Amino acid sequence: FFRLTRPSLALSLAKPGGICMPNRAKPMAIQGPEAFSKEAKGGLEDGVEAKIEPPREKRRRSPRSEAVSENMKSSHSTKRKTSFDEPSKYSNLRCIQTTLYGKAYRAIRQDGVPVAIKISDKTKAMGLEDPVKETRLLKTLRSSSDDCPGKQHICHLLTSFTHQVNSSALDEDGHDDQLLRIHANDTTKRSTAHWSVFEWANGGELLYFVHGIDQATAKRLFHQICQAVDFMHCNGIAHMDLSVENIIIHWPEGEAKGQPMAKIIDFGQALEIASATSRLGRGKQRYMAPELLEQKDADAVLADAYSLGVILFLLVTAGTPPYDCIGDEAFNYVWHRGKQGFSLLLRSWEKRVPPDALDLIARLICPVEKRIDVQSILNHPYLQGCDGGGQRNR
């Protein structure tokens, strides 16, 4: 029996907050299936916490003044909902990530709440990454009345708006403090930007959290991720770019106590399932279902399931990827041998994985006709006993 070379961790050893570049390994020919050769970009967000100012105590009012106040509240309720829809409501912007069409920032909202802001240049946004479509799909998820527990594992959009910015500040060499400095006589530096304001997560990316993770935490986080994907699919949306780069960690009670919570971000390549069979290669190459790279009509739901298989492999092996790229030696070995191939591969790498997890991985990283969907993942023996059980709440 030969010993296969372990893939390099091309997920990136970049420092937190830095730019995570996509895996650029050139695919080799698959032994049997067709060769593949498509890549896509990746990106993620990071940041720090900030204190929230306590509300001020209200003065006692007369019944008449309270009645007037209630009428004013009613008449201005719509205005209050959109009161954060302008750049002046955000301060302490600090760039945490350069994206394909702009930058991501950590900021403090006017009421003291920490938020993440993704600012995209609308003149450059095109192709698979569409901030306007992303906003529409995220609003669908946020407004959903579905009581599925996975809703809390989506990093929700708080608001979005367009505003002119200094385009040079969105360029690689621009300075963040110049973002809103627009000179009246210099129209060449003006750019209409799309602002997307998101919930803040205080734990950083799963990309950096996965190394050294224990099996119990790996199972808990994977269960949460699957609940989130199930919630998306129930609401007619496929993510199409699932990866450890696009999952962030939040500690509701602080990192010193409590359990980490997974939240999915970056819906820039998401699709509406009802209108989607895709011939386009979406997502990052290592996580992308082979049928997408073959430019075949692909089931978006099962494409997400394949990506979940790669994520699970990374979680239970503490950050070791199953292969460098589709078509390399390790990929061909497991693709044609299934569960037995994964077992032998992990043994050769001296990696110990729970048998149920190994079985689930083999049911996800496999040809599409054999692959199970997210509901079947939640009902798999590996995830039984997790909080919330394996069943979908509808």
Image (cartoon, helix red, strand yellow):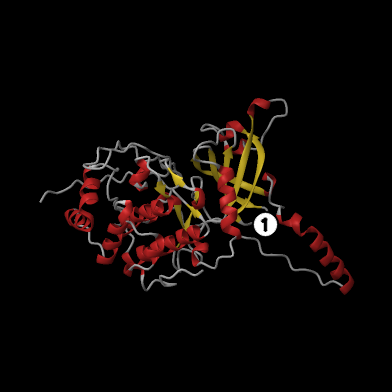
Residue at left offset 43%, top offset 60%: 225
Q: Which residue is mark 1?
A: 111
Q: Considering only vertical position in the picture, is 263 above or below 287?
A: below
Q: Is residue 47 visible?
A: no
Q: Considering only vertical position in the picture, is 259 above or below 347?
A: below
Residue at left offset 25%, top offset 62%: 353
Between residues 182 and 130, which one lies in front from this camera angle?
A: 130
Total numbered circles: 1
Left/right placement of residue 257 relative to residue 50 reads: left
> Percent x, y for residue 221?
40, 62
Left/right placement of residue 364 relative to residue 59 reads: left
Between residues 41 and 184, which one lies in front from this camera angle?
A: 41
Between residues 163 and 394, which one lies in front from this camera angle?
A: 394
Q: Considering only vertical position in the picture, is 182 above or below 389?
A: above
Left/right placement of residue 387 relative to residue 186 reads: left
Residue at left offset 37%, top offset 68%: 379
Q: Secondary structure at mark 1?
A: loop
Q: Amino acid at mark 1?
A: Asp
Q: Is residue 63 visible?
A: yes
> Percent x, y for residue 307?
37, 52
Between residues 294 and 112, which one lies in front from this camera angle?
A: 294
Query: Residue extending furthest left?
Result: 1
Mark 1 burial class by Cα count in 10 Å: few <14, some 14-19, many 20+? few
> Percent x, y for residue 324?
28, 44
> Percent x, y for residue 44?
46, 47
Q: Looking at the rendering, which quadrant does residue 23 occupy?
A: top left
Residue at left offset 37%, top offset 42%: 296
